[in-house]
Amino acid sequence: MRQRVITAVVALALFIPIIYVGGVAIEVTAAVLAVVAVYELFRMKELNIISFEGIISAIGAVLLVLPKARWFFFLPANVDNFSLFYLTVLLLLGAAVVSKNMYTIDEAGFPVLVSLYVGMGFREFVSARTESLIILFFGLLIVWATDIGAYMVGRQYGKNKLWPEISPNKTVEGALGGIVSAVVVAAIYVLIFQSQQDFGHSLPLVLIFTIIFSIVGQFGDLVESAIKRHFGVKDSGNILPGHGGILDRFDSMLFVFPIMHLFGIF
């Protein structure tokens, strides 16, 4: 527990200033985190990221994360990040020809899915900060409040398993506690920053969205648990002592921020 607290304090001390500054700092940080997350997924599958498919997958994630306006401004106006990402898909598919089908479309599917999953999550994380610091912290607070609420309520009152085949320790009571915690925190946050002005929606609608985002975040956590269970690993990595890997800390956010974007929060 002490190790977890120390790691959390150090991580926040480094992370909060980067979030506050935004711009190049958060874009580069998100790109680096995306590459680490790709590495963790390759490691779980016992693949070497220092390989053709590993490098292409990492590049694909970075191409999605870094905003075109700053990093790829020299390209034609009608070219976007997804066009660049598709080049990595073509390269992976082309490997089947070059290798005379020693490398197949089935094998190409994993690095494509990995870079898309990780890249889009961190892309929308950066987009939220580009929109405003208030919006970014709104998403982060929903995730954090959900995690804390689910842990506290689940530990105290949890009896009914939520999805034992995927995550044996999660309970229905904990999940509901996480949602309530997120709604309370979101209500306080939105009242402070005036929902209509900063979020473009009324308070009741933002709180309805919060319920959805909290559920989505918990589902993102379960998705990562399913991935780890499939590969037979406890943590995605060990870069954060006491907390596991980058995916262990960002799994919910990789789902929440894209859905926030889909709902027009930013």
Image (cartoon, rainbow, N blue to C red):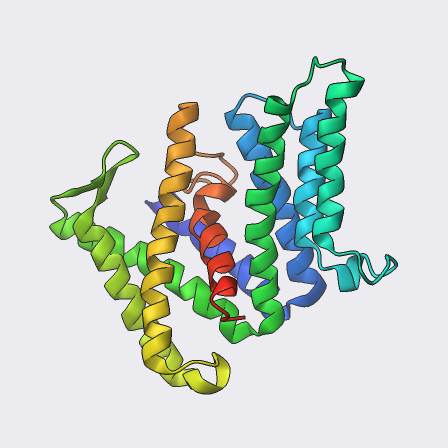
> On the rendered image, what quadrant is the N terminus found in?
top left
- Residue 264 image point, x, y percent: 50, 70
Rendered position, 72 above or below 93: below
Name the image quarter holding residue 94: top right
The residue located at (86%, 59%) in the rendering is: 76
The residue located at (62%, 32%) in the rendering is: 111
Residue 236 showing in the rendered view: yes
- Residue 52 image point, x, y percent: 73, 26
The residue located at (77%, 64%) in the rendering is: 69
The residue located at (39%, 59%) in the rendering is: 143
Front in this rendered view, residue 68 or 234: 68
Rendered position, 9 above or below 49: below
Name the image quarter holding residue 138: bottom left
Residue 234 showing in the rendered view: no
> On the rendered image, what quadrant is the C terminus found in?
bottom right
- Residue 50 image point, x, y percent: 70, 26
- Residue 58 image point, x, y percent: 67, 38
Name the image quarter holding residue 87: top right
Residue 161 located left or right of residue 139: left
